[in-house]
Amino acid sequence: MTISKDIQARLTHLHTLSQIAREITLPLFADPKGVENKASGSDYDPVTQADIDAEKALRKSIRATFPDDSIEGEELPDHVGKNDFSWTLDPIDGTRGFVAGVPVWSTLIALSHKNKAVLGMIDLPALNKRYMGHIDGTTSKSWLEEDGTKTDLKTSPCAEIRDGILGCTAPFGMFKPGELAAFKIIGSGTRFMRLGLDALGYGLLAEGRMDIIVEAGMKPCDVRALIPIVEGAGGKLTNWHGGSAADGGRVVAVGDAGLLPELYTYLGRALD
């Protein structure tokens, strides 16, 4: 894998950031404290003390090591740097699962260069596994780090939607009525679906275990880390119309890009 010196240094630091986040999040996962709802009205969007403490610690480490890099996060204001590198942080993706004791929550960290995601990490502390991805020009690679071993990842071929396994975290929570109708059409034509996986679903897609993920209401910090992992393994992650998903919103990921034209037809029928 050819990788520039600057990106290699930041890839090495990703492992440091993973350990920093784990030291904060794992103890609080065992005994979550300070859960607050940052949504209004009847909506529920929890933020925990672990989110805030971990993001502060991650930012401190990045600024100490790469002071000219920009930093975006979910909980704190953006830091504008002086070069073309930018980090995107989500210390706990899947906060509802974290609060409920479901171990599929993760720490998501992406590195972008000139507004293009080039490194991504899905770290699953409670499962002790870490998905990594790198895409940069003609270079692409994804791998899984688990129990001291490193395994290269490759998506599976899937010629027809009917042969695919579909994933989505929470269709009744993240979709508007028209979006949900489009999702149901796709779901009815797949082999089966699995729900509630948060970012783990994208890692499983990169492993070749799942084939399609359709979601909406995503933030940049939810999706940027996923792009190098999915695409480094040979898959594709876009918005519902085939454009960039880097800014979040409605996203679709596939292990086999040949599925996208038909999926776009169904997703294009969403009325809202």
Image (cartoon, grey):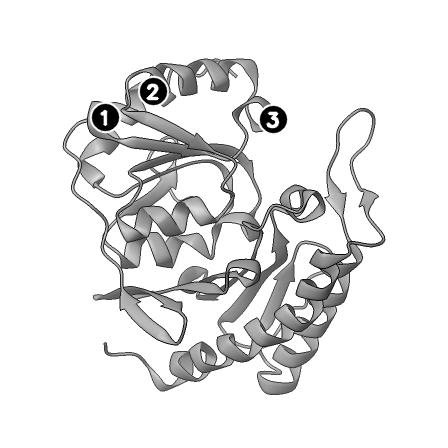
Helix, strand or loop at mark 2: helix
* Residue depicted at 29% across the width and 20% down the height: 265
From the top left corner, tell me how far across and down residue 195 is, in percent.
Answer: 47, 32
First in sequence, mark 1 or 3: give its number: 1
* Residue type highlighted by circle 1: Ile
Q: In which image quadrant can residue 145 be found?
A: bottom left
* Residue type highlighted by circle 3: Gly
Query: Image height check: is 177 above or below 20?
Result: above
Out of 266 and 190, give the one closest to the viewer.
190
**Is disc 1 in contact with disc 2, using a CB cutoff of under 8 Å?**
yes
From the top left corner, tell me how far across and down residue 140 is, in percent.
Answer: 25, 64
* Residue depicted at 75% across the width and 43% down the height: 46
Q: Which residue is mark 3?
A: 173
Q: Which residue is mark 1?
A: 161
How far apart are the two marked residues, 1 and 3, measured between alpha carbons? Answer: 24 Å
Out of 7 and 253, give the one closest to the viewer.
253
From the top left corner, tell me how far across and down residue 229 is, in percent.
Answer: 36, 57
Disc 2 crowd rating (10 Å Cα; few below 14, some 14-19, many 20+) is some
* Residue depicted at 47% across the width and 57% down the height: 225
Q: Is residue 38 left or right of residue 180?
A: right
Disc 3 crowd rating (10 Å Cα; few below 14, some 14-19, many 20+) is few
Helix, strand or loop at mark 1: helix
Query: Image height check: is 250 above or below 149?
Result: above
Disc 1 crowd rating (10 Å Cα; few below 14, some 14-19, many 20+) is many
* Residue type highlighted by circle 2: Ile
Q: Is residue 200 left or right of residue 102?
A: left
